[in-house]
Amino acid sequence: MKRLEMVRTLMSKAAQDEAVLEALLPDRKFNDETLGFHAQQAVEKTIKAWLAYLEIDYPSRSQPRPAATGREPGL
């Protein structure tokens, strides 16, 4: 996917998350965790769009992370 296309896609998805948040916000039956999730998603996608615009790579959630060893470096 081209860089600007990726930026537009991410910003569109962020706007969708924000719209969901705004729709749910007035309804008291949704707890802070649910609202916070959609807020976090909107912010995360906006940051990823900015990084994509700047051509800065960021780790994908699908990329495996190194396993924690439980030891501090240098021990």
Image: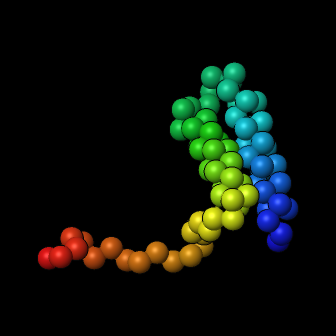
Query: Which quadrant would residue 55 be assigned to in this image?
Result: bottom right
Residue displayed at 65% across by 58% down = 51
In front: 45, or 55? 55
In the rendered view, would you say 14 is above or below 56? above
Q: Is residue 45 visible?
A: no
Q: In the current view of this chain or complex, which residue is farthest to the front?
A: 54
Query: Which quadrant would residue 56 be assigned to in this image?
Result: bottom right
Q: Position of residue 70 (x, y in %)?
A: 24, 72
> How many numbered markers are drawn?
0
Q: In the current view of this chain or complex, which residue is farthest to the left?
A: 75
Q: Position of residue 57 (x, y in %)?
A: 62, 68
Q: Quadrant of the N terminus?
A: bottom right
Residue displayed at 28% across by 76% down = 69
| 58 left or right, relative to 66 | right
In the rendered view, would you say 39 is above or below 54? above
Which color mode does the image show? Answer: rainbow
Residue displayed at 83% across by 54% down = 8
| 8 left or right, relative to 39 | right
Q: Is residue 17 visible?
A: yes
In front: 37, or 4? 4
Q: Quadrant of the C terminus?
A: bottom left
Query: Which quadrant would residue 3 be assigned to in this image?
Result: bottom right
Q: Position of residue 37 (x, y in %)?
A: 59, 43
Q: Position of residue 9 (x, y in %)?
A: 82, 56
Residue displayed at 82% across by 49% down = 12
